[in-house]
Amino acid sequence: MIFRRLFFLVALISWPVFSYDDRSLTDFDAGFDLPPNSLEASFTHRFYGPLDTDGLKTVFGLGSGANARIKELYISSFGLLVDANFTTDARELSFGAGYAVIPKTFLVNLLAYAQLSSDQYWDTTINDLSRKGDLYLQMVAQTKPFLFKRLLLTVALGYDLNENKPGLATGFEVVIRDNVGIIGELAPVTIKKVDNINFGNPSYSIGARVSTFGHQFIFFVGNATGIGPRKFLYGSGDYHLRLGFEIKRLFNFGHN
Amino acid sequence: MKKNCSRREFCLRAGQGALALAIASPLLRTGETLAKSTSSLETVTLDTSTNAYKALATVGGAITIPDPNDSSRPAIVIRTGTSTVTALSSKCTHQGCEVGLPQSGKLTCPCHSSQFDETGAVLRGPATAPLKKYTASISGTVITVQFSATAVIQQSAVQDTRHFSLVKRGTFVEIGLKDGIRGPVRMEIIDLGGRTIHDQIYENLPIRWDGSAVVKGDYLLRIGAADQSWMSEARLTLP
């Protein structure tokens, strides 16, 4: 019985027919392959508790609470991307818009992106939670698959107008098969100063992406607890491993 | 032998458990507000020789007491040494959950595992700011906790004018003493951040003070005898 179920699961995961391409990284959107006139809904989770230090006390970080994001990304027919996000950490509300340039003959695709956000924070002047707005600008360059169509590289340059500082992230995807890939991202230049508690150290994550039946499932480990490009570029307070996952669903209004 | 339970049975049991928890949780929460204290407007005194506060008689002991700043979350008082004590707000600076009493010197937020030391400093995120700290001291067996002026100002009912009369004309304030009360008096005006913006001893009464140079808003007006034999506080709103 168990083998039958396992076989069914493997068959399901490796079935490429209904899978869809989205070569975005965990935090950096690069939806160059998404079909026009479609909506991608995603749910992302990053657990706060370190996997490697808390051990069974927090079930390897799972029992320590998590940062979660709900995101809707719409791709228009002329390369415009708009997104709306709610992230539980800092009760962050953000709205973004980007424009994708996909040259047919050039190896690299480009995405210019701007995001308006509102974060909750602890205001020490009133000793209570308050809100502040932020504007974040970003340019993403992602190669088309090369090296036997097995590798994609991504570079993202972000600028936070509140912090008045840029950050830089790099990423990759190794294509295992059409619907399975290994993805990773690293922010060696962070926006926030090092405070050794929450931000400042380079953040990284590495995981696996599986696409099937209009869904994508991404499982990853990384040191950051922030979700999204701006928060990822803020850096992490440490280098401990934390679990995370993302589930995406594509609604293609053009080809149902 | 392990008994398998069906999905229906599992859902039923889970539902029953959730219902029992929902009924029990308000009952469990009543324990938080049992601590009683003798409180003047912003000062709380706790006698560690009494049963209610005996946990604070030993180093490492900690209790919760009502926090005038926050009716939904208590303040935490910690005996950090033989002659030292700390008082902190239990409101986590990440998302406002209530942090627990210290375990091995660390206060942990149950929501997202932020950790603070006994001075309120952040040890581990996601919180980025320290816990709000109150002034606390110990003398013999008596611990005194002073809550900030913000707490008093935010209590709209606080108008303790037993000792003085207050007349306001715009930003101009006139303060006279009630019958039988003599000067000299000390007048302090404290803003919401706890900063003293005016502190002066007046020999001649009534006091006439012009607040036009001060940013409009709510302040704590504290009038007391220069020899500290009495003190009254009231909210002062400057237009």
Image: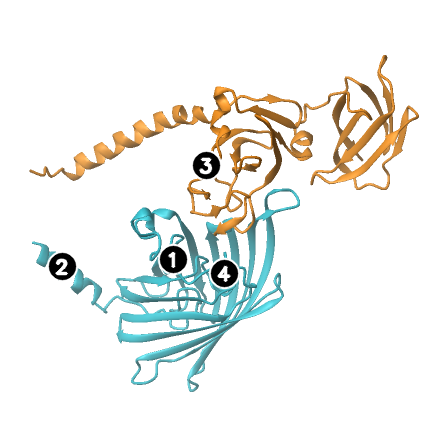
The tag earlier along the polypeptide, 1 or 4, is 1
The tag earlier along the polypeptide, 2 or 4, is 2
In screen coordinates, is A137 left or right of A214?
A: right
- Type of amino acid under label 4: Lys
The N terminus of chain A is located in which quarter? bottom left
Q: CA distance from mark 1 to mark 4?
A: 17 Å
In screen coordinates, is B207 left or right of B154?
A: right
- Tell me the chain of label 4: A
- Type of amino acid under label 3: Leu
Q: Which element is circle 1 on? A: strand
Name the colour scheme.
by chain
Query: For the residues tagged 2 and 1, is the chain the same?
Result: yes
Q: Is there CB contact under 8 Å for labels 3 and 1?
A: no
The tag earlier along the polypeptide, 2 or 1, is 2
Q: Would you identify the image quadrant in which residue A217 lies?
A: bottom left
Location of mark 1 (residue): A42
Q: Would you identify the image quadrant in which residue B142 lies?
A: top right
Checking the image for residue A231, the label placed there is: 4
- Furthest toward the top, the residue is B180
Query: For the residues tagged 3 and 1, is the chain the same?
Result: no
Q: Which element is circle 4 on? A: helix
Location of mark 2 (residue): A6
Which chain identifier belongs to the orange chain? B
Judge the density around disc 2: few (<14), some (14-19), many (≥20) Cα neighbours within 10 Å. few
Checking the image for residue B101, the label placed there is: 3
